[in-house]
Amino acid sequence: MALLDMLKNRNQKAEPVSVESSKPECYICRRSEEDIAGLTAAMTEEADVKIRLLRDKIGSKKDEVVQYYQSMVDQLAGNEYLEFKIETIKTDIPQFGKKIPNVNEIIQKSRSDSETVSAVVERLKESIDQISMDPAYDISQDHPEIQEACDGIRSLEHEKQAIADALKIRSRVLHPAQGGQVTVHLCGICSGLLEGSAET
């Protein structure tokens, strides 16, 4: 209970810190919200580094996909079989594979057997534009490694939020040993110390 007693005897004439203060600080350690923000940043620095690495990984994979799609489009430019339907190609994939570059990919990316090769190519062009122009464009459905990286980022963001919540300055009502009560602002660190002191 020593910490609670300290709150009572620290300054007999001082009023408890108002919970309405626009810039609260911890009643015990005097850390301000800016101090807590700096401490939070230091404690989450490792998570930030991991998040940057994962985002770089996603960016690199997207660049790789764009280059691959573009190579498919370039190889099919002017191909005499562009207007052939997927259902026709499926009748003799080995033979059409000699005449249509990346024929298996074209079949895989088709949405129906009635589509033509040119329709698939146009969709590849759209994907290239979307991936290149929109950083948030999601291609994880076709690329599990990107989904894994996204899951990792979400987990790290939750970890960062948990740290921020744990350190945050909050108002608390305390009951010193001499009686009465006092309402103060406490950071997560001092609040934890108080709880530990009360248990011993």
Image (cartoon, rainbow, N blue to C red):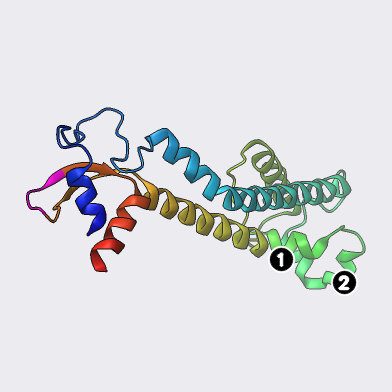
Mark 1 to mark 2 CA distance (whole Å):
14 Å
Q: Is mark 1 on a helix, strand or loop?
A: helix
Q: Position of 5 compared to 92: left or right?
A: left
Residue of label 2:
94
Residue 180 on the magenta segment: yes
| Residue 120, numbered label | none
Front label number (1 vs 2): 2
Residue 153 position (above or below residue 37): below
Q: What residue type is disc 2 on? A: Pro
Nearer-the-camera pick, 80 or 171: 171
Q: In which quarter of the image is the C terminus?
A: bottom left
**Residue at point 44% right, 53% down?**
163
Highlighted magenta segment, given as a residue range = 178-182
Q: In this view, does 140 lie to the left or right of 166?
A: right
Question: In which quadrant of the rendered view does residue 169 lie?
Answer: top left
Location of the N terminus by quadrant is bottom left
Residue at horizontal 36 percent and vertical 45 percent from the top: 168
Give the crowd class for mark 1: few <14, some 14-19, many >=20 residues within 10 Å: some
Residue 200 forms part of the magenta stretch: no
Residue 87, numbered label? 1
